[in-house]
Amino acid sequence: PLDPFLADPHVTDVLVNAPDEVWVERQGRLTRTGVTFADEDAVRRLAVRLAAAAGRRLDSAVPFADVLLGDGTRMHAVLAPTAVRGTCLSLRRPRRRPFTFDELVLAGTLSPAVAAVLHALLHARLAVVVTGGTGTGKSTLLAALLGAVRPGERIVLVEDTAELAVSRPGLVRLEARPPNIEGAGEVTQRELVRQAMRMRPDRLVVGEVRGPEVLDLLVALNTGHEGGLSTVHANDTGALPTRLEALTSLAGLSRAAVHSHVAAALHAAVHLHRDADGQRKVRAVGVFRRAPDGLVQVVPALIAPPAAFRRADPRRGDGPVAAEGLPLLRSLLDVRGVRLPAFVGAAAPPGRRS
């Protein structure tokens, strides 16, 4: 019963909450459908069959699974009674190619000024972290960033599940692997980051850091691997240092050591937000700066008000507001021979006349 939704190019997510409750997300909006399953057992059989097709165990002993299906769809399943109302399915359809920056500007995700900043960060080979909550478009923006990297660069991409919609010459993809039924054979993201460092990457990219692998990424970026990219869950750029602290504490690092690594490894953060109407937008660009007490802060360089994003004509309305960190961002870029366009941080984007 889910096939028509999975074939719909406008549907990004299909969510089964219960046998009689199926939702879909179209163009950023969740809508309840009239589709129902015969009973709980029908949902359970579907989940188990899809997991088995991907080589994953899903049963009463292991009642949840996160798998990549053959067509690129990502499925997360939780069986009843762990899922109280019945087996839950979350299916996310893959995008066949990454968005370009121009497409994201037209969609309202980026303002022209933010797009210019992202181009500059890539050209300068600065290390960038994309932040945001669940469903804000972090993976979409990361794929767009990878698509904008100049041809000829060797990119080694490490993912927990290979889901980024990106394909380009010079891209090497590494995917983590869970343990088998006997508990053996696990390959962690942390191990893959270490292996990636030995593969002569021009850029090392981790799809999402969510554990101690963040330490290995920081070490890599501190040892000559420039231009690294990753995503991390965080409520805003200001909360990012605390989030990185929490993740690196899993690797047994002291707070002072964490901030030393972060200060040396990371340069900029880009924060995504999902509005009440479902639209995903870059709301801030920040710069990492070490405070006198030795702790790292992310200082806002650009803050984008809602009027900076217009789907019909993104060049109308006010551009992102220049903030305290913009001079520092310009300085970081200038050192590497990259200059931001004059309109970045100005009162209006190019093309607007007063």
Image: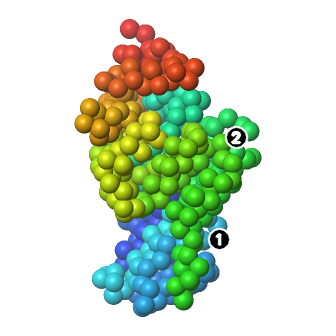
- Up-down: is 240 above or below 125? below
Q: Is residue 120 or residue 199 the one in the foreground?
A: 199
Residue at the image point whose x is 35% and y is 44% from the top: 259
- Mark 2 secondary-structure assignment: loop
- Up-down: is 305 above or below 82? above
How is the protein colored in the picture? rainbow
Question: Residue 257, image x and y in percent?
Answer: 36, 49
Residue at the image point whose x is 45% and y is 16% from the top: 343
- Up-down: is 89 above or below 122? below
Q: Count the numbered circles shown.
A: 2
Residue at the image point whose x is 47% and y is 59% from the top: 213
Q: Is residue 249 or residue 48 the one in the foreground?
A: 249
Q: Quadrant of residue 100?
A: top right
The residue wearing badge 2 is 153
Q: Amino acid at mark 2?
A: Glu
- Residue 66 in view, yes or no: yes
Q: Amino acid at mark 1?
A: Gly
